[in-house]
Image (spheres, rainbow, N blue to C red):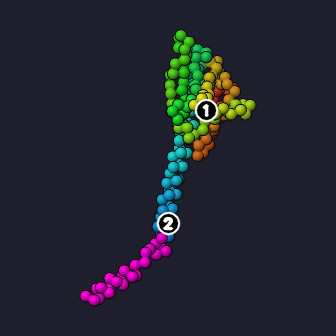
Amino acid sequence: MDNLISDNQYSRLNNKGVSLVELIVVVLIMSILVSGAVMSVMIIHDANVGAASDKLEAMLSSTRKTSIAREADTVKLRLQIESDKCYAVVYLKNESGEWEEADREKLGSTDIVYKVIKTDGLELTVSESSAVEFSFMKSNGSLKEDYKQIVLEGSKTKTITVIKETGRCLADN
């Protein structure tokens, strides 16, 4: 019995906590987990910017084609912010001359900054109070406005180049 007591007392006296090696291993594991989580968030955010760019390019192309097929000055695309989300909205002019919403595509949230750059270098930033409109000529699909680029900025930057003379849009990779 004396041996059991002395063994318990010895183990209690010898239990001084974690060793330095154990602490280093725990810190390494935690840093690997945290860096993995950060990388995952960055990849998701990059995908959001890329998806918004692809959607916007498709909407501009579709609006251009619709403009060529319809009567002059009856189609426009508007980039607008509503409820912390950016939308590309296509409007068509009805028979009574009023604009009606025909198509709406959610591009992404407002953690992405949407800028339209004019040919003179002036930047138009899409915000709650400031939308940007695109309209195309019926005759050849050329862009009416003097825009040359659309820039989407998030954790990475995507650029859509607009060719005014043809109305075509080209997204960078």
Q: Is residue 165 left or right of residue 109?
A: right
User: Which residue type does callout 2 highlight?
Assistant: Val
Disc on the earlier residue, 1 or 2:
2
Q: Quadrant of residue 123?
A: top right
The answer to whether residue 138 shows anywhere in this view is: yes
Confirm whether the magenta stretch covers residue 3.
yes
Residue 134 drawn above or below residue 40: above
- Mark 1 residue type: Val
Q: Which residue is mark 1?
A: 126
The answer to whether residue 171 is visible is no
Q: Quadrant of the C terminus?
A: top right
Q: Secondary structure at mark 2?
A: helix
The part of the chain drawn in magenta is: 1-23
Residue 100, image x, y percentages = 52, 18
Q: Which residue is mark 2?
A: 27
Q: What residue lies at 55% left-to-right and 31% top-to-bottom? A: 81
- Secondary structure beneath label 1: loop
Number of numbered labels in the structure image: 2
